[in-house]
Amino acid sequence: MKEYTANAIRNVCLIGHGGSGKSSLSEAMLFGLKAIDRMGTIIEGTTHSDTFKEEIERQSSISASLLTAEYKDKGIKFNLLDTPGFSDFTGEVKGALRVSDIALTVIHGVAGVEVVTEQVWDYAQEENIPRAIFINMLDKENAKFDEVVQDLEETFTNIVPVNFAVNPGPGFNQVVNLLTMKLLKYDDGKISSEEIPDSLKDKATELREKLMERAAEADDTLMEKYFDAGELSQEEIEKGLRKGILEGTVYPVLCGSATAQVGIMSLLDFLGTYGPSPADVCVEKARNAKSGEVIELACDANGPTAALIFKTTSEAHVGEMSYFRVYNGTVKSGDDLINTANEEHEKINQMYWSLGKTRNAIDHVVAGDIGIMVKLRDSNTGDTLSSTATPLIVDPPKFPEPIIRSAIRSKNTGDEEKVSSGLNILHKADPTFRFEHDTELGQLLISGQGDAHLEVIVKRLQDRFGVEVELIEPRIAYRETIKSSAEAEGKHKKQSGGRGQYGVAFIRLEPQPRGDGYEYVDAIVGGSIPRQFIPAVDKGIQEQLKKGVIAGYPVVDVKATVFDGKFHSVDSDEFSFKMAGSAGFKEAFAKCKQAILEPIYDLEVKVPQENMGDVMGDISSRRGKVSSMDSEGKWQIVKAKVPLSELYKYANTLRSITSGRGIFRRKFSHYEEVPGDIQQKLVQEYQERRAAEQG
């Protein structure tokens, strides 16, 4: 492949809802570019973007893939980034969007705008990336171009068709190009251009007028001319479109069918002509790792090097692969670069451009381009590799926080260390997945974007690290507290020959406001407990706080006052008063009105209008309390507070209720008292557990 400068590169990210045909479209684009001589299919598992075993089995993308191809006739290099369309894997979308210059939003020609469509559109908006739209699958039964365009107009602003479908549905093969005002026919891979028939001229004229208006609105000079003359030249329309797309004031809509190869070359031509190049987009800001100074990188191949790693994977016989974009300078084989995240040096050896599993070695990557490095020593997703003379930090992708969690358990004894090591490697590659050893719960917890995400993690642990694990329900971090006050005597007395042990402490417990935690008050007067032993009483109480009293959960929000006591001049010591403090606390706690608290989470669910009733009913069945309901276009936003114990496997239920269209997010809110029947159950389980341990 020849070398391409920044202005001849198009970094295009394909985004959209699952099932809209992104992988098929990328396959069709590669075929149109003559990068492949046969189109693969999802069903056969032969597409160039879905190459992982899990993707082939699921028949859907779970990872962003890099597909590089040349458009030799135009002198343009395309870096296509095909992304997953399910919310479980939106971290992959975030990473790919971060390094793209335009987001091509793929829309299902029957379903129209779907929930993940809006989600990833918002991601592109957060990154301030220009957007274009491709309505796909217009050869399907019940395909409806005009209705989908109307759906787009109601959901997103500033959309404008640049072509329209003539005969959507089975047999679809005609598109009107509003830029050239020609009818394009696609038959057996051949494209013919004809004059627009009379029956379509009015529609074509109306839509071209709208296109002209949008182009004029992008530039004040063009707007003045349009007002004065009532029209723009072809050159002026093109100028306005380019500017509008770049500045995000125009979202062009194209259409076709990937599997039928209809509209694909028009799409490629449009992206080549109007799509922003790395040289067109706004300068990237970076920080000097030493001085903190903010520097603007102008995509200069001869400037100081700054390359962002946006994705990390590993393959057998290849090792770890780091996908990166060069924002400034040129990365060459043999370079000694510094990772500004950890100040470690990286020697750059092998680099590749990628077409799925097909990779060709390259010796350098210029500013604006994307490539793959192999076997970096200590660099991960989100890190910047920079020249040592000018160490720069480019902002990493903003990955979403995990929304679900599960406990994980090894099936084979002795694999725990291998499991932890494997999880650590997987986390470095995928920051949207996290894990922790929870010492309080005594479990290894993993969290991610959805059940499918965690299932993929488990599968990768088995396939790559040879360890078998199972997902189990995580325990809940309940808390114990009191709702009334009480006093009790705590006594520790032991005599077994020689020096004995003696200490008495009178403890008063009072409830604290929720969230105020533990408070210890020394109210001893008259020396009933020597001053040196008073901290020991506190220590004994705090040890008991961690163990709990009625159900084995930590105690919170209590005020403990030691107000009297007794001691022995010979037998009293620090240990005796620590034990007395612990005993007094337990005795007083038993006299109080007790409560068990559970973690409550804020839940935000986005669903179609028709699913609102079922979703709210399900939330109520989970002891949830709906706090608000809002509309966002055709979607409904339900906000509620729900106990964490009721949210296990919620993603599965929501997916079932909404046919996969609903999405949710959650975060910790506060602790709240559990109902009486649940408290009784938790206390009984604790007592049975204790009896089993002692028996």
Image (cartoon, rainbow, N blue to C red):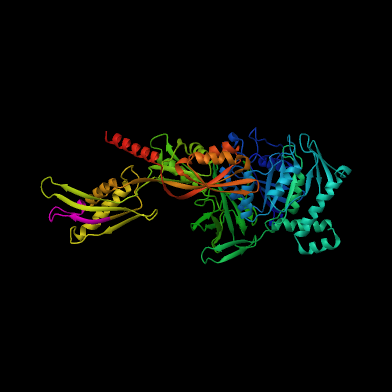
x, y percent for residue 490: 22, 49
Residue 146 is drawn in which quadrant? top right
User: Where is residue 109, by image quadrant?
Assistant: top right
Nearer-the-camera pick, 143 or 247: 143
31 horizontally vs 226: left or right: left
Lateral position of residue 220 relative to residue 604, left or right: right
Image quarter (top left, top right, bottom left or bottom right) of the C terminus: top left
- Residue 351 appears in the figure: no
Residue 484 coordinates in the image, percent (x, y): 32, 50
Residue at the limit of the structure toward the left, as seen here: 498
Magenta span of residues: 561-576
Q: Residue furthest right?
A: 198
Q: Position of residue 50 (x, y in %)?
A: 62, 39
Give the answer, above or below, for where 300 lies relative to 163.
below
Give the left or right position of residue 688, taking residue 419 as reference. Answer: left
Residue 641 part of the magenta-drawn span: no
Percent position of residue 411, x then y? 42, 34
At 75% from the left and 36% from the top, the residue drawn is 139
Q: How many tags in the picture?
A: 0
Magenta stretch contains residue 564: yes
Res 644 seen here:
yes
- The residue shown at (49%, 58%) is 343
